Amino acid sequence: MIKLFTVLLALQLPFAVIADNKDGEIITIGFGSGKAPFTLFDNQVIRAEGHEKHYGIEYSIVRQSLLLIHRNIKPKAIPPRELKKSIKKFRNIDAVSGVTRSSKDKLYYSKPILENSYIAVSKSSLGSKINSVSNLSSYRVSARTGSYATIRDGFAKLYHPKKGTHTNKYKEYDSNLIQHADFWEAGSEVVMITTEESFNHYRALLAGTRDTSVEVEIAEIFPTKIRLYVAFRNRKLKNEFNEALEDLKFEGVYSRVFQHYNQELSPDFRRPNEVEISGQLKEN
């Protein structure tokens, strides 16, 4: 266990903010970009004073774990599909976060930092009766790029880009912002595959540019949770990280990170950057 006084210091704060250790080793970690609210490296939100370095749920969990073992973090935003390639190609990247485990590489995987649950969201006006993955085949469906490879429970059978049976009704997005904006377009009848955290985040973020007040139906049809890890080059650092991560969970800091980024519980620490959002929507 990490020294008790260090953990207690974290618990005194509303959301585990331990000051950077100026003498601590700097660890460069790649994070998947465009995964709000899990990573928030773009300019879509304006942060309140004191929250300038609050870059998302995933980032905060990793950062606080590293600070407990006296390491400082240098984040590097990387497209999610490029994370594994980047750590293999660039020696200056010490680890990558938000990846699935593999036994085929020479990386050292942490204990799970996130367990994501996916949901299917549709507007109530669509009148959908989705109670299983197979029901999706009756509708147009959207998801993030590469979702067919990570979402279990028969999703790939329908939407694998080469072998899927219903790819003609399926669209993938590189951008969460554009996916959610298209969902909220007037007249859209798409069923959107996302996480509850992302849905709530973008519903609030897009309220100024789309009508996000319409009623929706949320179908929890994916029983399998997707576990995400940090992949390290160094086994010793991975072991130290795991110990710190367990302390964050045991002492309640881990759960408070989620509360901090919950739009309903903490609505004031960030607000939509309307100029940036409108610009990104126009580009697409």
Image: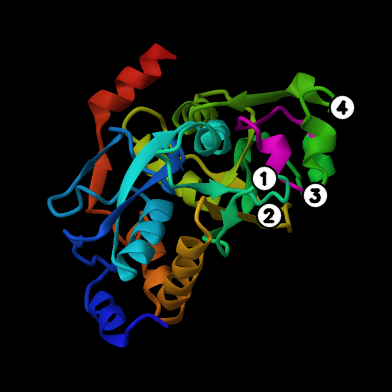
Q: Is residue 31 visible?
A: yes
Local crowd at mark 4 within 10 Å, few (<14), some, or many (≥20)?
some
Secondary structure under tag 1 reads: loop
Residue span colored magenta: 137-152
Residue annotated with mark 1: 105
Residue annotated with mark 2: 220
State how far apart marks 1 and 3 are (Cα): 25 Å
Mark found first going from the N terminus, 2 or 3: 3
Q: Position of residue 7 (x, y in %)?
A: 31, 79
Which amino acid lies under the numbered mark 4 shown in the image of this protein?
A: Thr
Give the quadrant of the N terminus.
bottom left
Label disc, if present, on residue 153 of the rendered structure: 3
Q: Is residue 115 visible?
A: no
Which amino acid lies under the numbered mark 1 shown in the image of this protein?
A: Asp
Q: Position of residue 48 (x, y in %)?
A: 16, 49
Q: Indicate which label's residue lies in the foreground, 1 or 4.
A: 1
State how far apart marks 1 and 2 are (Cα): 33 Å
Secondary structure under tag 4 reads: loop
State how far apart marks 2 and 3 are (Cα): 12 Å
Local crowd at mark 3 within 10 Å, few (<14), some, or many (≥20)?
some
Local crowd at mark 2 within 10 Å, few (<14), some, or many (≥20)?
some
Residue annotated with mark 4: 165
Asked whether residue 122 is drawn in magenta, I would say no
Q: Residue at x 55, y 36 (%)?
A: 88
Give the quadrant of the C terminus.
top left
Q: Give residue 172's quadrant in the image.
A: top right
Nearest to the observer: residue 233 or residue 284: 233
Which amino acid lies under the numbered mark 2 shown in the image of this protein?
A: Glu
Mark found first going from the N terminus, 1 or 4: 1
